[in-house]
Amino acid sequence: MLHYMTAHELNAKIREREISAGEIVRSVADRIEKLEDRVGAYITITADRALEEALRVDDALARGGKLPPLAGIPTALKDNMCTENIRTTCGSGILHNFVPPYSARVYEKLVQAGCVLVGKTNMDEFAMGSSTENSSIKRTCNPWDSERVPGGSSGGSAAAVASGMAAFALGSDTGGSVRQPAALCGVVGMKPTYGRVSRYGLVAFASSLDQIGPFTRDVRDCALVLNHICGYDRYDSTSADVEVPDFMSGLERGIKGMRVGIPSEYFGKGIEEGVRERVTDAIGVLEGMGAVCDEVSLPHTDYALSAYYIISSAEASSNLARYDGIRYGYRAQDYSDLVDMFVKTRSEGFGEEVKRRIMLGTYALSSGYYDAYYKKAQKIRTLIKADFDRVFKDYDIIACPTSPTVAFRAGEKTDDPLQMYLSDVYTIPVNIAGLPALSVPCGFSQGLPVGLQFIGKPFAEHTLIRAAYAYERSTEFHKMHPQV
Amino acid sequence: MKYETVIGLEIHAELATDTKIFCSCTTQFGGDENTHCCPICLGLPGVLPVLNKRVVEYAVRAGLATNCTISGFSKLDRKNYFYPDLPKAYQISQYDLPLCKEGYLEIKGGFGSKKIGITRIHIEEDAGKLLHETGDGTTLVDYNRCGVPLIEIVSEPDLRSAEEARLYAEKIKAILEYTQVSDCRMQEGSLRFDVNLSVRSKGSNKLGTRTEMKNLNSFRALVNAIENETKRQIEVMESGGRVVQETRKWDDVTGVNISLRSKEEAHDYRYFPEPDLVPVVLEEEFIDRIRKELPELPDIRTERYISEWGLPGYDAGVITASLPMAAFFEECVKEYGGDPKTVSNWVMGELMRMLNEKGIEAQQIPFPAGHLAGLLKLVDRGTVSSSAAKKVFTEMFETGEEPGKLVDSLGLVQISDEQALTGIIKKVMEANPQSVEDYRGGATKALAFLVGRTMRETKGKANPALVNKILKQLLEG
């Protein structure tokens, strides 16, 4: 099953000339052709280009040339990362025809590493959502149960990796949009520290929270991809000028003696029993490997969701104001004057959830309300950071569930935005504090995947990877694939 | 009732950096529409701004030159509003933590000298330009100016008249030119004024309701707009009405001042900290370095002209008010080598007159300073008379030619040949026997008449001093 091999396995096989890059990409292209109608992971498929590039890799190899590190690896990108001359829609009607004249920094880096792009994946419009149901383009199904959602907002990327339609994919995580769909689709998903990966070319949702991260089929691949997307970028002032370690090294050092905090607030009201059990089992596994696990408290967790919806919506209301129909994207057909054109373009071009958040954010920033909402939310942000700082004085990592539930049914929460928002209750505090976190499969409940979340200190992705790798090695969950 | 006008000015100046504030596009004026743009200044989805360090440097320089405190910690904010010339639908500016604050500068005029407070100076980006004259009713947008760096200099409401406002604005312009923060090309809109104005009864210390007039781009417009709006507000009050807080538009061509929008219709800009940029943190050494590199400022230069070169205070003030003018003047003094006052007389007289007549500024003087110096030397040497020199000067302005050549081509070489002059004077005396007699009879006034006749006879080319001497010899001899 070529299409379910990991990037590091494929990489080795290409180099040893066991399989050609062409064969690999063809197997993924076939897989996409076979499954896309059922899964709906992609907005734009670029398999033809990918095949041409793969043939070039094989050519180079035949001529004895030196291959870049990820040569020929079939890769998918969430459709909010700009790709030169390839449509980038953000899952929105307002950008349905937008073809960027430049590429996101992460895409440039992956191309440089030899990756071949097989497609741009489906997502909640402008990354606002937890089920990918807010896409204006199509629905994405959970590969484990087509009646259920893949999570969101990077649902297309998660579903593509889970169903063998890409070796790995990138998503963006503003409040859990990589980790939650990774958990719901049974793959590994990481949100690096804020500033670790350049946001240049990532269409902004909430600038102070957005971060790009990988979906992979195991932890080693997560480390491999991180090695190629992290690093300072002078075109992103918020990217961090800190050293990037080799995330592959020290993978196997184990977690004996590692101090793990278990936050009691993450096991309270709203968590499904099956999720609690699987995560508790996983903590037992960690202890069995010599980790020291203690209950800890993150007392301001309850306020995180409200603070998040104020900050992220405020920033979004400003970030999305540029879609006015003047320069690119959708423009209303009939309008009487300039203001009418703005109003109609935006009313017709944006979906319900996006409009809800623009209104929420606009209100929160309005004169007279700024202090009560935006400023207060920023204060809560400081308190939440302080919660984590306190725990990280005594603990190396935090372990907890990624999402309170397994994948829910399509349509189940679309009429109840607050219920939908609660899906991210365990992932949001991490974005607010700017920390790295990773979700790794930890079993099944009702036949659906459950995710275990590790949260780390700023720029300590390698510690998370080490812990997740040790855990993964002692389980078989990452080797299980859905019957699509 | 006696009224007092209270004015505060907001001055926008384009910085003279080579590149834009958040990308590396050129700031050059002109260029075909939308050719000085990139994905960043066009605000395409996904792009991020990176602050141009030079912009911070220039703004700090402006702050230091106007006695401001420089903030060690400041930040950028988003000012949100929809308009087609603003591609991100927000302008990156500074809200509550500007780069520079609490400065002042001094103005001098008929009222003596006065300190004008400067509330703050902050950095921000310019917007694009709408082009309405397309002929088919559509509007096009040119984004070349998008992201050109600006500073906004906000004064305290310390100004009390159009004259004070003009002097203050001229002083700001001079300082920005001296420090090379901005080239202040007013006709290209690189210096623009917003006026906040209210009127109150004299002696009151309560401020009246103010109106705002935006985007005035000449000193003349500034003065006219202030005088017009003062009159309007007084008329409103005297007719028992109340001044409404609003934005008004001054049209310099028609001299009409109309209401644009009231306070109720004012924008809520929803300022918030720009999350795509990090705060601006300045080290003391950085600020000190800029302080040390500050050039001589206009006030200091004025003092120097007065004390070292003996210029009258007024002349020194006028010449130093414009850096290109002061530079022209100094260059001329250097090349001339004579008394700087002679140069200043010409600059204040003939040069200013021609600039006014042509409606141009000092940087557009069509000949180098050396030409004026050369002309003054010709006068000193007696090659041309001062009245002929004025003709040469006017011609120099038209053609940019060297004065020596012009003197020749215009045939204005002064006649200093005693023999030749004696011949002409004898003829003049023969033609005017009455005057000769008058003089000899004690009416010395007649001498001036005879000098005049001689000058006319020589078409102004005679050396007047020599004519005087010879006439006296002939009349008395």
Image (cartoon, coloured by chain):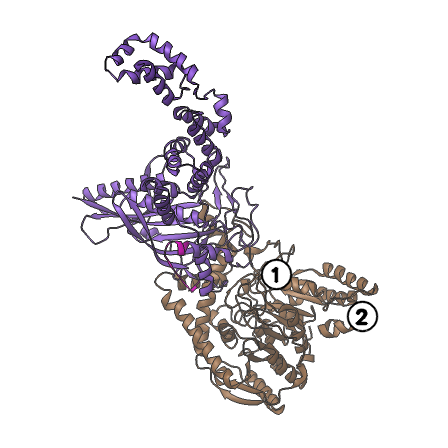
Question: What is the x, y in percent for residue A477?
Answer: 66, 81
Question: What is the x, y in percent for residue B101?
Answer: 37, 59
Mark closer to the observer (2, 1): 1
Under tag 2, what secondary structure?
loop
Q: Amino acid at mark 2?
A: Ile
Residue A299 position (above or below residue B392): below
Range covered by the magenta-colored residues: B62-75
Q: Amino acid at mark 1?
A: Ala
Earlier-in-chain disc, 2 versus 1: 2
Q: Quadrant of residue B234?
A: top left
Instruction: Tell me if residue A249 is in the magenta stretch.
Output: no
Tag 2 and tag 1 share a subunit: yes
Residue A394 position (above or below residue A47): below
* Nearer the observer, A296 or B394: B394
Q: Quadrant of residue A28?
A: bottom right
**Is residue A423 toward the left or the right of residue A118 in the image?**
left
Residue at 24%, 53% (x, y): give it: B207
> Which colour is chain B painted?
purple
Q: Chain of mark 1?
A: A
Under tag 1, what secondary structure?
loop
Q: Which residue is mark 1?
A: A104
Residue at 46%, 69% (x, y): give it: A309
Q: Which residue is mark 2?
A: A19
Instruction: Tell me if residue B65 is in the magenta stretch.
Output: yes
Mark 2 in CB contact with mark 1 (< 8 angstroms): no
The image quadrant where one finds the N terminus of chain B is: top left
Q: Is residue A107 visible?
A: yes
* Nearer the observer, B27 or A362: B27
